Amino acid sequence: MSIVTPLDHQARWSVLRRLGNSTVAKATIAVPLIGYLLLFNGEIVKFLSLHTDFCQPADCGPSLRLLLLYLGCCSIAMGAALYSLKCPALIKKYDSAAAFFEAEKTYFCQPRNLDYLLKLIESGTEAEPLAQDAAYFKYNGERRDVDPNSLADPMGELYRILNVSYPRIRLTALIAYCVGIVILLVPTLITFFQVVVTYNFGRGVS
C-alpha cells in the first residue's frame, strides 16, 4: 500500500501531462517507424558499410548507443501514445482544478451546462472505481441564480474524477516514460565517462 499510493499519485493524468503535452514526447511517437526504417534497412546498412567513418565494413550495424537511443524513444513513445489516446481532454487542457475552475466557471453557470456538469459527476464519468460513490451536489433556488464561486466544489470533483480515470493505463504510461528515460541515460553516461577519461588521459600524456 505504501508503494502503490505514491505511484498512483505520480501516475495521475495531471502529472503525466507535463511530459505528455510536450513537443518532444509527441515527436517520439514517430520514432519506432522511422527508426526501424533507418536502423534495420538493408540498403542503409550496405551504404554505411562503404564508409568506415560510420562502421567497419566487416561488422557494420547499429551501434549499442544507437540501439539504446531507439529503444528509449520507443518506450517514451508508448507512454506518449497511451497519454494521447486515454487522457481526458479536460486534463490535457488544464494543469489543475483551479485553472479549470477559473476558465470555465462562467460557462457552467448556465442551467443546461450546469445540469451536464452534475450528471458527469453523478455518473462518475469514465472512472469506474468512483462511479458507485460519486459525489452529489444540489443547489437551492433557481439554477440561473447560481453563484460562480459555488461551482468550485463540483468542478473540482469533476477534475479529480477525470484525473484518476484509467488507473492501469496511467500506471503503464508512467512505467513506459520512466523506462525510456533510464534507457536514454545509459548512452549519455557512457559518452560522459568516455569524454572524462579521454580528457584526463590527454592531460596525463601532455
Image (cartoon, helix red, strand yellow):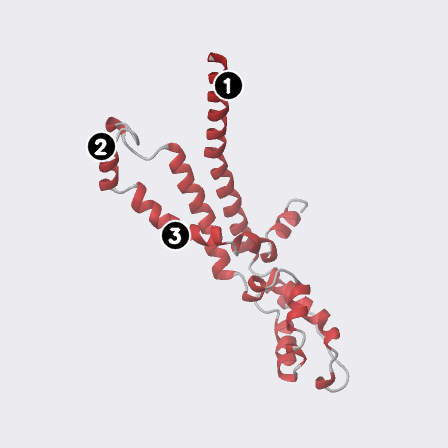
Report crowding for label 2: few under 14, some 14 to 19, many 20 or more residues within 10 A (C-alpha).
Answer: few
Q: Secondary structure at mark 2?
A: loop
| Chain-order first, disc 2 or disc 1 | 2
- Residue 161 position within the rendered picture, expressed as x and y whole percent measured from the top left: 63, 64
Q: Nearer the viewer, residue 145 or 160?
A: 145
Could you tell me which residue is drawn at 55 percent across and 59 percent down? 166
Q: Nearer the viewer, residue 166 or 183?
A: 183
Q: Nearer the viewer, residue 177 or 24?
A: 24
Figure quadrant of residue 71: top left
- Residue 143 position within the rendered picture, expressed as x and y whole percent measured from the top left: 71, 84
User: In the image, is residue 59 above or below residue 82?
Assistant: above
Report crowding for label 1: few under 14, some 14 to 19, many 20 or more residues within 10 A (C-alpha).
Answer: few
User: On the image, numbered disc 1 is attached to which residue?
Assistant: 200
User: On the image, numbered disc 3 is attached to which residue?
Assistant: 30
The amino acid at mark 2 is Leu
| Chain-order first, disc 3 or disc 1 | 3
Checking the image for residue 50, the label placed there is 2
**Tally of numbered tags:** 3
